[in-house]
Image (tube, rainbow, N blue to C red):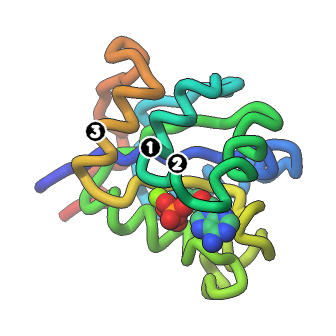
């Protein structure tokens, strides 16, 4: 099985609105394995690196302020096709276009308050995990239910 790790973050609005457990449940219920988690106030430097491809966008200053506005729940989830399927669980970037049943479809309205982040490629997931976590903060274990999730 090709197992991947993806970086999923609950943004300050998701933390403030008490959505941490609801969002985590989506990943747990699907069968993905939590291998890293922390609640953190991200620095401006970290966020500029995290969103390096967006610094020239007109919405970037607002995005930066939003991400600096409170704690973020940073997580690493692992499993088969975790990067692409993680994005499916999040839903479209613009919550108004996100389907019901997805996190953004169920819990958000404005693109600038879309409650969660998910890596968009395996390569970016590796970069983001290395940016937000030290190697020792990522754990390795086999869940007891593993054989009931994967054939
Ligand atoms: P995603 O978070 O789905 O990967 P992205 O990487 O294109 O989307 O953009 C990062 C974040 O920037 C996104 O979650 C919310 C914000 N954003 C994107 N497009 C925006 C826009 N047109 N107006 C305001 N904020 C936007
Ligand atoms: Mg993105």
Between the residue at mark 3 and the residue at mark 1, the CA separation in whole angstroms equals: 15 Å
Q: Considering only vertical position in the picture, is 134 above or below 37?
A: above
Between the residue at mark 3 and the residue at mark 2, the CA separation in whole angstroms equals: 20 Å
Q: Are marks 3 and 1 in contact (CB under 8 Å)?
A: no
Q: Are marks 2 and 1 in contact (CB under 8 Å)?
A: yes
Picture quadrant of residue 71: top right
Determine the quadrant in which ligand 1 lies.
bottom right
45 lies left or right of 129: right
Question: Which quarter of the rendered picture does the N terminus lie within?
Answer: bottom left
Query: Visible in this render: residue 29?
Result: no
Crowding at label 2, few (<14), some or many (≥20) Cα neighbours within 10 Å?
some
Between the residue at mark 2 and the residue at mark 1, the CA separation in whole angstroms equals: 6 Å
> Where does residue 23 sit, x and y in percent of width and height?
66, 56
Residue at horizontal 67 percent and vertical 24 percent from the top: 40
Depth check: give the residue in front, 78 or 87.
87
Residue denoted by label 1: 52
Depth check: give the residue in front, 133 or 1.
133
Question: Which quarter of the rendered picture does the C terminus lie within?
Answer: bottom left
Residue 55 numbered mark, or none = 2
Residue denoted by label 3: 126
For label 2, the SS is loop
For label 1, the SS is helix
């Amino acid at each position: 099985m090709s197992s991947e790790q993806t970086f999923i973050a609950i943004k300050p609005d998701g933390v403030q609105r008490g959505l941490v457990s609801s969002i985590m449940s989506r990943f747990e219920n699907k069968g993905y394995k939590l291998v890293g988690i922390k609640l953190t106030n991200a620095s401006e430097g970290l966020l500029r690196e995290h969103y390096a491809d967006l610094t020239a966008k007109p919405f970037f200053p607002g995005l930066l302020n939003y991400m600096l506005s409170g704690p973020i729940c940073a997580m690493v989830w692992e499993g088969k096709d975790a990067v692409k399927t993680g994005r499916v669980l999040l839903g479209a970037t613009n919550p108004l276009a996100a389907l019901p049943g997805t996190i953004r479809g169920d819990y958000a309205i404005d693109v600038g308050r879309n409650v969660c982040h998910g890596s968009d490629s395996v390569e970016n997931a590796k970069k983001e995990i290395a940016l937000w976590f030290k190697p020792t903060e990522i754990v390795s274990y086999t869940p007891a239910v593993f054989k009931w999730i994967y054939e």
